[in-house]
Image (cartoon, coloured by chain):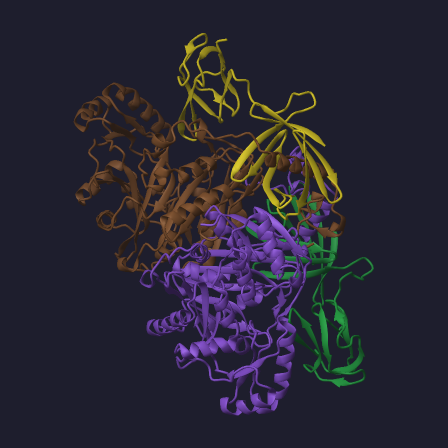
Chain colours: A brown, B purple, C yellow, D green
Amino acid sequence: MFRKVLIANRGEIALRVMRACRERGLRTVAVYSDADANAPHVRFADEAVRLGPAPPSESYLKIDAILRAAKDTGAEAIHPGFGFLSENAGFAEAVRGAGLIFIGPSADVVRSMGSKTEARALMQRAGVPVVPGTEAGADDQVLIAAAKDIGYPLMVKASAGGGGKGMRIVREAGALEAALSAARREAKAAFADDTIFLERYVERPRHIEFQVFGDEHGNIVHLFERECSIQRRHQKIVEETPSPALDESLRQKMGEAAVAAARAVGYTNAGTVELLLGPDGDFYFLEMNTRLQVEHPVTELATGIDLVGWQLRIAAGEPLPRKQDELRQLQHAIEVRIYAEDPAAGFLPVTGTAEYVREPKGPGIRVDGALESRQEIPIHYDPMLAKLIAWGADRPSAIARMKQALADYVVLGVTTNIEFLREVIAHEAFAKGETDTGFIDRNMPSWKPKSPAPTDEVLLALAAGESARKSERSGAAGPDDGDRFSPWQTLGPWRPGGAA
Amino acid sequence: MFRKVLIANRGEIALRVMRACRERGLRTVAVYSDADANAPHVRFADEAVRLGPAPPSESYLKIDAILRAAKDTGAEAIHPGFGFLSENAGFAEAVRGAGLIFIGPSADVVRSMGSKTEARALMQRAGVPVVPGTEAGADDQVLIAAAKDIGYPLMVKASAGGGGKGMRIVREAGALEAALSAARREAKAAFADDTIFLERYVERPRHIEFQVFGDEHGNIVHLFERECSIQRRHQKIVEETPSPALDESLRQKMGEAAVAAARAVGYTNAGTVELLLGPDGDFYFLEMNTRLQVEHPVTELATGIDLVGWQLRIAAGEPLPRKQDELRQLQHAIEVRIYAEDPAAGFLPVTGTAEYVREPKGPGIRVDGALESRQEIPIHYDPMLAKLIAWGADRPSAIARMKQALADYVVLGVTTNIEFLREVIAHEAFAKGETDTGFIDRNMPSWKPKSPAPTDEVLLALAAGESARKSERSGAAGPDDGDRFSPWQTLGPWRPGGAA
Amino acid sequence: MQSTWIHGDEKHTTAVRPGSDGLTIDVGGTQFRLERLESSDPGEVVLRNGDRIIRAYFAARGDERWLHFEGRTYHFTLERAGGRSRGGEASEGDLTSPMPGKVIEVRVEEGQAVKSGQSLLVIEAMKMEYDIAAPFDGTVAKVHFAAGDMVDAGATLVEIQVPE
Amino acid sequence: MQSTWIHGDEKHTTAVRPGSDGLTIDVGGTQFRLERLESSDPGEVVLRNGDRIIRAYFAARGDERWLHFEGRTYHFTLERAGGRSRGGEASEGDLTSPMPGKVIEVRVEEGQAVKSGQSLLVIEAMKMEYDIAAPFDGTVAKVHFAAGDMVDAGATLVEIQVPE
């Protein structure tokens, strides 16, 4: 196996990949922008190379700079993480062209799956059901005509899009033209490509995706589903597995479709087949993500498989460690995404400084994060701060743990969606598994945080915290702090220690 | 179910139980000695009641004070944790006598299993194999005579003993008398009871224990084995499940014996049947622990079952959540015990202050601990600082994660066994699963820490740390730390934050 | 040490008197005798009030304070002697940008009457478009930006006259 | 800032010269230009030496220093101007108690010759008996405690004369 890996990413996913490398004795190389000069992923690596200024286009998207960093440090393989260049066929090509190992599928697969329309055509040939809709590239007149056949409601989607960017739901013909122009504008801004297309909008659908893995010896397996239906602004915020909507036979049908989809393109390494599931049990191919997924931890916890570990082994040419019949869903796992955003103001991203951060811990709790106290949230990158995962023997115990973990998750100084997520998880509709994509609009419309008047206990803690702050700032040291170096030394009466 | 639980214990196990309570919305009451006035388990609870001075006899062992605390706070149930009063029949009786729920088995079961000789007799009647040996209570002359029949090597054991206290291995007749007196002296000191007995010493044995659970409706299941053979001074330091020594048929035989043992005494709640396994596959009943085990996390991670959660549910009268055939070993888990001790000096316990503590984290890693930076290690209690658990799809991945986690575990200012444990886990004999109780004497005799000369990188970090300390002590603040309260504010150039 | 805190549109006053073996805190006229528990976590505030343990997390920036207690985060602003306080809320009539970004489209003009929820302008940030809607009925008094302008977080975008 | 460190029986000298954009550290005559990375963890020391990241953990007490680097913990003692340093090692001839406890039995007397590994006395602590054995051959010069005495950690139990 290769001995040094460059991680072409930042934040929690860079840390996640580095941990998997270190367990296997592989050295790690971080890359960073000026905004990340002191970031956790830089401090965690064995080596670190600067790419450029903060904007992604000048750093994390600079293929040449990344390849140079690999060359200078002697890295033999590159892991793209997700986002940034992870689904850029040119990058996969350039990495291999430079004689390095790209930890992901072939450039051709990335390219064909990168175009929704090509992917759609491929899947139709492979016999995987797709949503009725138009080809991409048509002008507005053609689309408006086609809309009549598809029928309403329908969706306007960007050909190069993803994560809801450039997506519009249109419920009657009158609103179509405005939606087309808005979608084109967003698509152009986001992807420098304003190609759009239409497809049927399935009411109360569920977003069910299957984790697939292929090796270079022609073996392909799936690691079961993840339900990611709970979304805001068409972006996932809650993911879980198993899905409360699937029974064994449906799970098997969908799993086989996912494997067929992967086989149709000769898929290698980790990928995800996204399917749309209607209330009637019909499902349609949406798209295939040719990379590790943000929500991969729920699959790791439910199946016991280390997905990043498998990525490394397969990239090194090893065969898949397990056959399909050796894979099982052992436990129930739920992930929520912690964002710096304001759920009460249309989930707008917010920036600022997280003055104090305390992650929950305990049995059945995992936090994949790179957020620290006193950390500024850079405006240049995705505002996801961390992922909180809770698991247990069954769905109710995973939910109970998640509720408590969200209550214990402390992020002060910047607005987050933590309280919102708590109410999602605590909602009876969630307990009932009624988690289609309309969950939030239906159950939590125009949500506002309850902001009760502070109780006496809150005011007591506030006053005590303030007085400790004052004595800290006046530099008073605790009696026997004499010659000890300690960051807490100046906290005055707040000397720590379990024993007197 | 009851709504408020008093935890009659301290340290990591008190925290573990409180977490399980909070997930279920149960309020928690901590008790503490003067040495623990600021301890983590006190700060974590909803309420806390002082018991008395530091010595256990004046605090954590004071039954009346604990019952008063429960009464004053309105706690409806008491969890004893392990150690202290957890296997004290009088306590179980007193708790129930006060109209409270004791989270554990009946007082009678605790009493009969508390006496090795009575337990042994019970098991013989139940058809569970026991090690050849003498009854307890005989005087030295009788024991010396009996020794001839049992044969050498044999063990001298304290009747009221546990955790190796009062245990002696005798390899030839000449050494017997000295061993008897030493064992009686230790037993008297430890348990105010110098009753001892003899039993055959099985060469290269393995310590295999089975987790059992009984409910108040007559159901009993086992949750498979834990191998705890790697011991120093007859105390476990490494535990894992599944055991590399068991195949399916032996696992089933031993599991059935464990259930038979539990059934023989009408066992309720969580218990552990300790068995001695010889190289020949013969196994003998050793003792039954009528409480939660220190090493319970490996079973939780391997089976996906929340053992403390089950304890609470069963204590509330619920039936066992699962039948035997619904329980499986899903993953491999290993636990190591982090002690404040000096492995290079006979594993002597050490006291002192942990000036700085940093726990490992990441996928497949769990830390059950109550150790914090600047914490004094109280001399009055067990010197175990924390438990580190690593798990994975198979034994090799669990081992790989454990190795890395031990390398990432930072405890500065007090001597620990962390480096020793790293070498145990990294030893090829461990990789081969050759983990009988002689592992340490055979593979790591008179172990000493490698203390290589510091490299340039070590000295660079030392110098940088020292200069940061100096600027910290001179109170220099970073430029833009202006009006922000931060514990790190006075660290001078060391301003944190992921983004510049 | 006495402090007055602004929480939403309420005010709360606390006074702390540290003693040798604890501290006395006055909240709205009621006196509490409390003991502080030492913690190695510098953001953790733990108090013992009789048997009751109060565990909270505290942070400060400028005149802002955040306190996390039992799963909820409370935001306070310290009232300065003058009564004026830095980083206070914007007055109800102003509509400020919740984030830094670029104005894509302005959909109202000055003098125009708007209904609560009506779209006023569109801001683009992080490659997404965000609709800035009127929080209440009123009349547009001033529009501070035009399409194409960059705006900072907190910048006043539109001033809306609330009908008396 | 120059410091001399005692590690085992070696000495190491380091000198730090902070600069505006980093610091220069001299180790045994070699100069290193390093950059410090800020961390929210006050015990974390992170340096960048070219592409190489050096991440270590540091703590101090009195003249003692601990440094954890790549899975290993190093213990240093700061050498004081006078050369004398607080909390230094006991001289080779003394046998100190590794822990607080109670002397159960003294098995040697003054003037007696002892062999390395020979049991000198038994201490009880945490309900276990611990055998204190001679670390080397020699003659017992002094026994400081008798059976029944309580001893502190670090207390000299027995002095052993090493044959020249």
Q: Residue at x 50, y 84 (%)?
A: B133
Residue B340, x across and y down, in percent:
62, 64
User: Eyeballing the image, is A171 above or below B7?
Assistant: above
Quarter occupied by residue A201: top left
Residue D164, x across and y down, in percent:
79, 82
Q: Residue at x 66, y 40 (%)?
A: B489
Residue A450, x across and y down, in percent:
48, 30
Residue A406, x across and y down, in percent:
47, 42
Q: Farthest residue in the right direction?
A: D82
Q: Residue at x 60, y 87 (%)?
A: B140
Of B352 and B81, the residue lying toward us = B81
| Apparent side of residue B363 relative to residue C85 in the rendered image (left or right) | left
Quarter occupied by residue D59: bottom right
| Apparent side of residue B400 relative to residue D28 in the rendered image (left or right) | left
Q: Residue at x 76, y 43 (%)?
A: C20
Of A399 and A156, the residue lying toward us = A399
Of B327 and B146, the residue lying toward us = B146
Residue D47 shows up from this direction: no
Residue D18 shows up from this direction: yes
User: Eyeballing the image, is B349 above or below D164?
Assistant: above
Quarter occupied by residue A220: bottom left
Tally of marks: 0
Q: Farthest residue in the top direction?
A: C111
User: Eyeballing the image, is D106 above or below C75?
Assistant: below
| Apparent side of residue A372 relative to residue B56 in the rendered image (left or right) | left
